[in-house]
């Protein structure tokens, strides 16, 4: 009995993965086409953004409250911003252009979101890894001190960005205000995200409040993995996990509502 149930779950998972893979390929072709460098724009685009910000911060000799190299500081900070900010931007308004696909029994709202999340998360991750290796190879960056801590911080930021993206994506089906509000809000949130400062450089009272911003905890964790004993990182992992878990539950509840209310075209 148990084996038959496991077999049924395995078949269902296989079907859903094929659906998500097909949606993923459709999204790549729709967004990047077959011309020029095609799907390579998936990670070349965030690489160009990150490199541009790195050059600007270097030329401006930005003050970030520490003696860390500005290249390493910009890479860890802005790559994290691209990770949590791009996923919501791609999921908001994603249901409407895919309503015709809902006629297929196995295509659901969550599959559309997952395809876009894999695309955005994968692009940001490839960009971060590629730029890190490139900067290390040309001597702009020292190798990270603890790769596993970087992975933990990166995954926590990705979890936050993904749950926020699904929540806002499902909510945007009800109101266009979500899309209009998110864009200015994401830019206003950027200075508070920890990308452009170290928490340790802030006054003690400000440190307590800024750690209430979930992304700050993830960025600090990534930088601890990168710079190790050269910095004093501040983060609250239980708080970050709690925020992500609550946001995930809200997102799944909103997806269930969207599944009930949408009408395939």
Image (cartoon, helix red, strand yellow):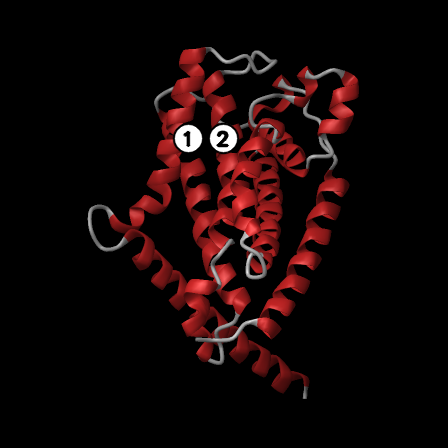
Q: In this view, does 41 lie to the left or right of 21?
A: left
Q: In x, y percent, where is residue 133?
A: 40, 32
Nearer to me, 69 or 184:
184
- Rendered location of residue 36, percent (x, y): 20, 46
Disc 1 on helix, strand or loop? helix
Left or right side of 82 for 248: right
Q: Nearer the viewer, residue 164 or 129?
A: 164
Compared to 198, does 240 lie above or below? below
In this rendering, would 55 be left or right of 259?
Answer: left
Q: What residue appears at the point 46 percent right and 56 percent down from the top-left corner?
A: 116
The picture quadrant where one finds residue 213 is top right
Q: Nearer the viewer, residue 129 or 78?
A: 78
Residue assigned mark 1: 50
Decide: is 27 above or below 126: below
Q: Name the residue under label 2.
A: 78
Quarter of the rendering occupied by the N terminus: bottom right
Q: Residue furthest left?
A: 35
Where, by quadrant of the figure, is residue 146 drawn? top right
């Amino acid at each position: 009995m148990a084996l038959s149930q496991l077999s049924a779950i395995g078949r269902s998972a296989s079907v859903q993965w094929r659906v998500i893979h097909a949606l993923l390929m459709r999204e790549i072709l729709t967004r990047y086409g077959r011309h020029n460098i095609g799907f390579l724009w998936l990670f070349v685009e965030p690489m160009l953004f990150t490199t541009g910000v790195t050059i600007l911060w270097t030329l401006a000799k930005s003050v970030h409250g520490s003696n860390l190299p500005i290249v390493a500081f910009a890479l860890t900070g802005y790559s994290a911003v691209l990770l949590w900010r791009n996923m919501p931007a791609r999921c908001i308004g994603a249901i409407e252009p895919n309503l015709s696909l809902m006629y297929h029994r196995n295509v659901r709202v969550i599959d559309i979101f997952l395809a876009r999340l894999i695309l955005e998360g994968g692009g940001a991750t490839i960009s971060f890894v590629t730029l890190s290796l490139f900067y290390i190879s040309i001597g702009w960056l020292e190798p990270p001190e603890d790769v596993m801590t970087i992975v933990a911080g990166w995954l926590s930021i990705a979890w936050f960005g993904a749950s926020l993206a699904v929540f806002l994506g499902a909510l945007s089906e009800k109101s266009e205000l979500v899309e209009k509000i998110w864009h200015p809000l994401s830019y206003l949130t950027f200075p508070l995200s920890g990308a452009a400062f170290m928490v340790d450089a802030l006054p003690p009272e400000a440190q307590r409040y800024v750690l209430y911003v979930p992304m700050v905890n993830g960025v600090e964790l990534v930088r601890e993995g990168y710079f190790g004993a050269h910095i004093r990182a501040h983060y609250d992992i239980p708080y970050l996990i709690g925020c992500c878990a609550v946001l995930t539950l809200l997102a799944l509840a909103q997806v269930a509502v969207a599944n009930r209310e949408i009408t395939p075209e």
